[in-house]
Image (tube, helix red, strand yellow):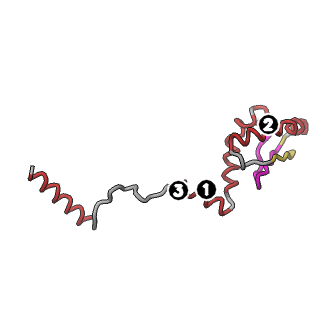
Amino acid sequence: MARVDRLAWIRKAILMEWRGGEEPSHPDKGLHRPGEFLDGILRAAGASEGVDEEKLRELWREIAGDLVARHTSPDSLRAGCLTLKVLQPAMRFQLEQMKPRLLANLRDALGQGVVKSIRFSLG
């Protein structure tokens, strides 16, 4: 038993000398993940809407439904105003009628303060 303890002590001493100090107690101690700071940095730089816009493009079919998604596409999201490109004037009229429901779906999917209003443009 004493031999095993002696070998463990020698091993520890050699590793400590080779590393130049004590072995860290936990390698991840004191490390932070980028996600902890990324939202704050993007908001401070004014770039957070770009992230929300990209997320919106990914989720658009689920938010709007198949029929609406086939005839529209998110164009931009600036200061809480979502601009949708609409292919046909008749669909634009239909979407004006659906605006409250679309806003509710957007708030559910993206969060409360991301999209505050919707604008439609033909294109």
Q: Residue at 75% across / 48% down in the picture?
A: 115
Q: Quadrant of residue 19?
A: bottom left
What residue is shown with label 2?
A: 101
Q: Please give the residue where the numbered disc 3 appears in the rendered image.
A: 34
Question: Callout 1: 10 Å neighbours few (<14), some, many (20+)?
Answer: some
Q: Amino acid at mark 1?
A: Asp
8 on left or right of 54: left
Q: Position of residue 9 (x, y in %)?
A: 16, 58
Where are the magenta residues, as a range? 70-85
How far is disc 2 from disc 3 in space, using C-alphas? 35 Å
Q: Residues within 10 Å of mark 3 (few under 14, many from 20)?
A: few
Q: CA distance from mark 1 to mark 2?
A: 28 Å
**Looking at the image, how many numbered discs can be counted on the residues?**
3
Please identify the quadrant where the C terminus is shown: top right
Which residue is farthest front? 112
Q: Residue at the left extreme? A: 2
Judging by the rendered image, the residue that carries numbered circle 1 is: 39
The amino acid beneath tag 2 is Arg
Q: Is residue 110 magenta?
A: no
Q: Image quadrant of residue 73?
A: top right
